[in-house]
Amino acid sequence: MLNSIGREIPDFIPGYGPVKPFAGAFSFPPDCQRQAPKVKMTVPGEIKLVTSLEEVFKKIAITDGMTLSFHHHFRNGDGVVNQVLAVAAKLGIRNLKIALSSVFPVHEPLIDHIKSGVITALDTNYLSGPVAQAISQGILDTPVVLRTHGGRARAIECGQLKIDVAFIAAPAADDYGNINGIQGPTACGSLGYAFADAEYADHVVAVTDYLVEYPLSPVSISQTRVDYVVKVATVGDPKGIVSGTTRVTKDPVGLKIAATAANVIQASGLLKQGFSFQTGAGGASLATAHFVRQMMDKAGITGSFALGGITGFMVEMLEKGLFKNIIDVQGFDSEAIRSIATNPNHIEVSANVYASPFNAGCVVNKLDAVILGATEIDTDFHVNVVTGSDGVIMGGSGGHSDAAAGAKLTIVVANLLRSRLPVIMDAVLTATTPGETIDVLVTERGIAVNPKRSDLAAILAAAGLPVVNIHELKQIAEKIAGKPQPIKLSEKIIAVVEYRDGTIIDVVRQRMAQE
């Protein structure tokens, strides 16, 4: 069947189940109830602190076929996932589903666990590095489920993603299970992506390397949701939080794009008192914050809040009074970690509060502007951030689709050519974020405005900005680099791309071997 953006989707996918096709950004109303775990009782004197991860496996009785969940606040510095799965392999446990909110190169050991049958299913929001390469080559028999950050919180709350045991990397904990992410030698900042796991998993394990005397303060996740606490040598390396995708670009072309994106925000009329803002994790996206900061400073504007994965740029804007608040679901550098530990206006929130579409109002709904990246964008403004032009998985929506749906102004920034290939296509290889939620594409050769925003196109043109039809930009790119040849795909589905509401916006099919 075809979904509403014309992507061909099976009505049933083995290893996934029946499919609800994407029908529009706000066309699928909630039809579920919160699925809470069983109520528990801990009696006075009962000890939660255990001596090892292996003991945790035995106390909970972790068995074949369970779903184990993890969060990704340490990004490429995570140390918990590999430790836990090594224990599972040692104990001979098989057929596990791993619900890890994002996968990074540090998680390469998952490949061997997939080959040995320890892992047979993977559920994540972002997939990169060797594991992404292996999945693209068809190593898993069942398709990976790729969700959005808000969509994962929704799926957990609604019982679609049922978690048996949540292992939460806790930079600081006490022996009764209170945890936070802002203390200890491996502080990572906000623990926002772990909140849903803690709230709805059947069992919750805090894994820490910094055990403090009871009671820990402040508390991010409460003792009332934690069954066991285990101390290990290290839960991760905070230096791995910062990666190439969280540094501001120094490329002159990227800086030009960022400056133009800031000019689009200014011309739109949104840059005024109470302005709210989010950037993505790409270098040009982050550089836009620099130019927006200059504009706000010059105009004497005080914004309401900055949102999303937080960097030092946002922290500096908060501390200079350019924003009243930071709303933080994940820290992207050491300054973000320092700030959330010391500034009461730097607010930790869950992924549910941040971006779930199925609640009484998530924070992305209050965004004025968001800056996002793209691996591809097509002439209908659909965006791909899952696969490269070669069909290999290299990312995922994360908060891309969530923020795009919520913001008043959604800007995609991208070089016209990516790896010497045009970024604008007739149809993206993998649709991640629907064009109806994208307002503007900013490139070094001009600005394309979605036809549904003719009002905005007129405003930007009147401001002297270089508004160009997206088809013209596509022609410019193809004149420089030629028109890329389509790749050949097999029938095997290696990933299912869920939109934030749980409908299927696309699937990823395995690339056929080259002749």
Image (tube, rainbow, N blue to C red):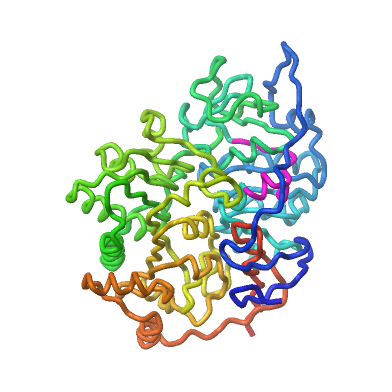
Q: Is residue 161 above or below residue 444?
A: above
Residue drawn where x is 76% and y is 28% of the image: 39
Q: Above or below — where is 222 with respect to 494?
A: above
User: Quadrant of residue 453 in the image?
Assistant: bottom left
**The magenta stretch spans which residues?**
154-168
Q: Residue at x 62, y 57 (%)?
A: 501
Task: Residue 161: say if magenta.
Answer: yes
Residue at position x 34%, y 60% in the image: 284
Residue 364 at x, y percent in the picture: 47, 51
Q: Would you say 9 lies left or right of 375 here? A: right
For residue 427, side relative to residue 454 (left or right): right
- Count of labels in the image: 0
Name the residue: 26% across, 38% down. 321
Left of 255 or right of it: where is 432? right
Q: Nearer the viewer, residue 459 or 412?
A: 459
Q: Would you say residue 128 is visible in this rendering?
A: yes
**Which residue extends farthest left?**
298
Q: Is residue 251 visible in the rendered structure shown here?
A: no
Query: Which of the image's four quarters has the C terminus?
Result: bottom right
Residue 331 location (% of width, % of height): 44, 42
